Amino acid sequence: MKTMTCRQLGGPCDLAHRGETHDDVINAQDQHLKQAEKEGDAAHQPARDEMKGRWRHPRKSLGWYREMKQAFADLPED
C-alpha cells in the first residue's frame, strides 16, 4: 500500500489517496475531483478539467500517466 496526495497528482490540496497500485490512487483522485466539482470547489476545478481531458484523450495523456506510474513506484510502502 502506498500513498499519494491530491497535490502530487496535480490537484491543489493534500488529501491522501492510498492504494495497492498507481491506478488505485489515480482513480481515487478522479473521484475526489468529481466530488469537489459537485460541491462547487473552484480550487479543484482546473485539476478536474485536466483529469476530464485525460480520460477523453488517453493517448495524449500517456506522458502524465507514465509520470504518475513512476512517481508511485518510487514511493516507499506505507
Image: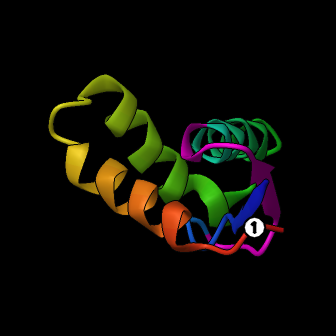
Left or right of residue 67: residue 25: right
Q: Is residue 68 above or below residue 61?
A: below
Looking at this rendering, what residue extends furthest in the front direction? 77
Residue nearer the viewer, 15 or 24 = 24
> Residue 9, located in which quarter of the rendered image?
bottom right
Left or right of residue 78: residue 24: left
Left or right of residue 48: residue 57: left
Q: Is residue 3 above or below residue 8?
A: above
Residue in the picture at 78% in, 38% down: 35
Q: Residues within 10 Å of mark 1 (few under 14, many from 20)?
A: few
Q: Which residues are magenta?
A: 12-23
Looking at this rendering, what residue extends furthest in the left direction? 60
Q: Position of residue 18 (x, y in %)?
A: 80, 53
Q: Position of residue 43 (x, y in %)?
A: 65, 67
Does the rendering let one see residue 38?
Answer: yes
Q: How is the image coloured?
A: rainbow
Q: Position of residue 12 (x, y in %)?
A: 64, 72
Q: Position of residue 54 (x, y in %)?
A: 34, 38
Q: Is residue 71 above or below residue 23?
A: below
Residue in the picture at 17% in, 32% down: 59
Q: Amino acid at mark 1?
A: Glu
Q: Quadrant of the C terminus?
A: bottom right
Residue in the picture at 67% in, 64% down: 6
Does the rendering let one see residue 10?
Answer: no
Reply yes or no: does residue 7 show up in magenta: no
Residue in the picture at 43% in, 35% down: 52
Q: Label 1 belongs to which residue?
A: 77
Left or right of residue 31: residue 45: left
Q: Secondary structure at mark 1?
A: loop
